[in-house]
Image (spheres, rainbow, N blue to C red):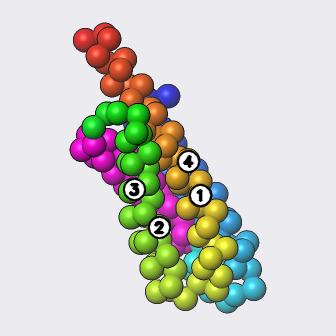
Amino acid sequence: MTLNAHKYFSATLAFLVWGVWTYYINIESSNNLNSAMAQGIFSATATLLMVYLVEYFYSVFPHDKIFFLFPAILSVIIASTLLISMHVYIHTYDVLNTVLPSIIISFFFSVYTTHIIIKDRYTIALNP
């Protein structure tokens, strides 16, 4: 899967999965639909943003194995801070259980995205 296909497929999936998850986890709240829509929209947008951030941070750091996780860590910190702030602002009923699974998955998504970037650049270098 190319990086472009990867990011748009992932953004659509993030909207659906994390929107439904947020609705379910906050079912006892009268604000669950607002929280679910905000989470879904944020997840899709953040997924696209995280691909950009991973690409950017990958280009900034040396391409040594020791720096492999840095793009993922930094992009997840940025996205998670925005996500938690959003849920606090809109008064989501259960912020921790709402955001924790998506933060964990987004870290693995970012690591995988870094892997795809490395693979794409290696392929381009071999086949100019």
Q: Which residue is mark 1?
A: 104
| 10 Å crowding of disc 2: few (<14), some (14-19), many (20+) | many
Q: CA distance from mark 4 to mark 3?
A: 11 Å
Name the image quarter holding residue 4: top left
Residue at (67% x, 89% y) in the render: 30
Residue 64 x/y as whole percent: 35, 33
Residue 75 x/y as whole percent: 39, 56
Label number found at residue 13: none
Asked if residue 46 lies in the magenta stretch, the reply is yes
Residue at (52% x, 80% y) in the render: 87
* Image quadrant where one finds the C terminus: top left
Q: Which residue is mark 2?
A: 80
Q: CA distance from mark 2 to mark 4?
A: 14 Å
Residue 86 x/y as whole percent: 46, 78
Q: Which residue is mark 3?
A: 75
The answer to whether the residue labelled 4 contacts the one labelled 1, judged by CB atoms less than 8 Å apart, is yes
Q: CA distance from mark 4 to mark 1?
A: 7 Å
Q: Which residue is mark 4?
A: 108
Three-letter code, disc 1? Ile
Residue at (40% x, 39% y) in the render: 66
Three-letter code, disc 3? Ser
Q: Secondary structure at mark 1?
A: helix
Residue 89 lies left or right of residue 93; in this view the side is left
Q: Return the residue found at the far front.
A: 66
